Amino acid sequence: MKLVDEVGNVQLMQRINRLKVLETIRSKGPLARPEIARMTGLSPSSITNIITYLLERDLVAGMGTIDSRDVGRKATLIRFNPSAHGIVAVNVEIDKANIALTDLAGNILVMRDLAFDRRTLDFEILGLIKKEITLLLEGDTVQRNGVIGMGLAVSGLVKDEGRFVFSSSLRWKGLSIKEQFESLFRIPVFIQNNSKTKAIWALNKHVEDNDRNVIFLDLTMGIGIISFYDHRINEAVIGELGHTTVKKDGPPCFCGNRGCLELMCSVDAVLSNCREKLSRGRCAILAAQMKDGDGKLSYDAVLHAYASGDGDVRAILKECGEYLGMGIANIINLFNPQRIIINGDVLLKSGFIEETAKAEAGKRANEELMKGIKYQKVDIGIEESIQGIVLYVAGRMFELSDSIL
């Protein structure tokens, strides 16, 4: 029994070291062997054995040489090989899902798009997604890129490794998705909030080395925040800022609360307030534009009316911005961030709501905590969203999976 335990411990340590080397090359590479040894703390002989192992499995590849003082000659650079395996990434939004086959770096090889409306029931949406994934996996590309994992990103609260998913925007209550998909597709499946997967992309692309404390604020579906500390996501922060109360007797929310921030500050809130004022003969410029057009109320029509000088519309957008500013002030007072990265391509389209929010946050947040704070706006599209999912899944696979190493 003792011999079996010793062998098991040796195998576990080998796998941990391989994962350490692979992750170092993936995140910091290309690197020469001496650099990898320094970064991992492993001996040069261990690095040689591990690199040989990874080369045999196509997970890394050589590329060019550099002068090396450590070995007294040119050293071969080792790079991560993302084409070694494939990952299925699924991004689920309010009225659509994008299902992609990618390599390990998130480069999209094939993508299928799925549209549905808000009346579509949860099991119907999941059934449609399963069908699209099945069609994707039957393609020739998959034969050349063996799929080793799958990631699903959804708008909402994800707990217990994806065994509980609650989404106000999708009208999902307590779904258990992980078991369904793993049972059907027979590969590891990772479920995550899509604000978090977008934040992972932003962390890799936009956070500077000296930014130790950063907040990612996602306004695309509800309002979510992700906390970065020392270049890692703070998993203790759930980030459901949209479901914090900002109006005591506000409208009821799907989550069961009343007066939630995302009910007071969203495209839907702006449109609802415009409808109410239109019904009372207000928003004259907006009404005239709708009459001259197709008669439909849209967010673009609202922004056009604002730009044309509609005072009632301006007041509605200003109120939306003020509520968002309250939320940002709360973020600043709670987290004291150096930088706030804001992702909100639709809601912040005109710029007026964004500027109003920043001004309101400046009035409400602690004056000392406001000093030196940086705002940065990003527009994360579908390709970036898919890459964020892949970065998350690949990271999890490199931590856990026997199928890689």
Image: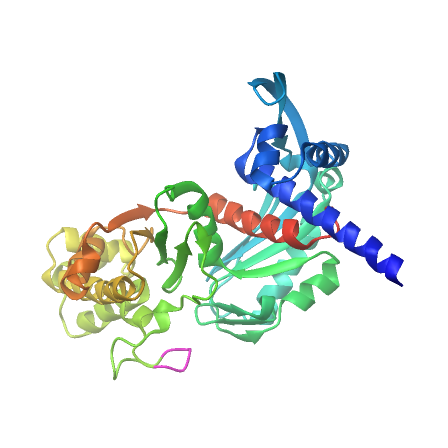
Where residue 145 appears, x then y in whole percent?
Answer: 71, 40
In the image shown, does 274 or 390 lie closer to the viewer? 390
- The residue that appears at 75% across and 32% down in the rendered structure is 52
**Colouring rule applied to residues:** rainbow
Report if residue 256 lies within the magenta region: yes
- Residue 108 shows up from this direction: no
In the image shown, does 355 or 17 lie closer to the viewer? 17
In the image shown, does 153 or 82 lie closer to the viewer? 82
Magenta stretch mostly in which secondary structure? Answer: loop
In the image shown, does 159 or 150 lie closer to the viewer? 159
- The residue that appears at 54% across and 61% down in the rendered structure is 192
Q: Quadrant of the N terminus?
A: bottom right
- The residue that appears at 52% across and 45% down in the rendered structure is 387
- The residue that appears at 46% across and 53% down in the rendered structure is 232
Would residue 197 be found to the left or right of residue 206 on screen?
right
Report if residue 73 lies within the magenta region: no
Q: How many marks?
A: 0
Would residue 57 be found to the left or right of residue 265 on screen?
right
- Residue 24 shows up from this direction: yes
Where residue 190 appears, x then y in whole percent?
Answer: 61, 59
Where residue 336 appears, x then y in whole percent?
Answer: 28, 59
Q: Which residues are magenta?
A: 253-257
Where residue 225 appears, x then y in whole percent?
Answer: 38, 61
- Above or below residue 288? Residue 82 is above
Q: Quadrant of residue 139?
A: top right
Q: Quadrant of residue 42?
A: top right
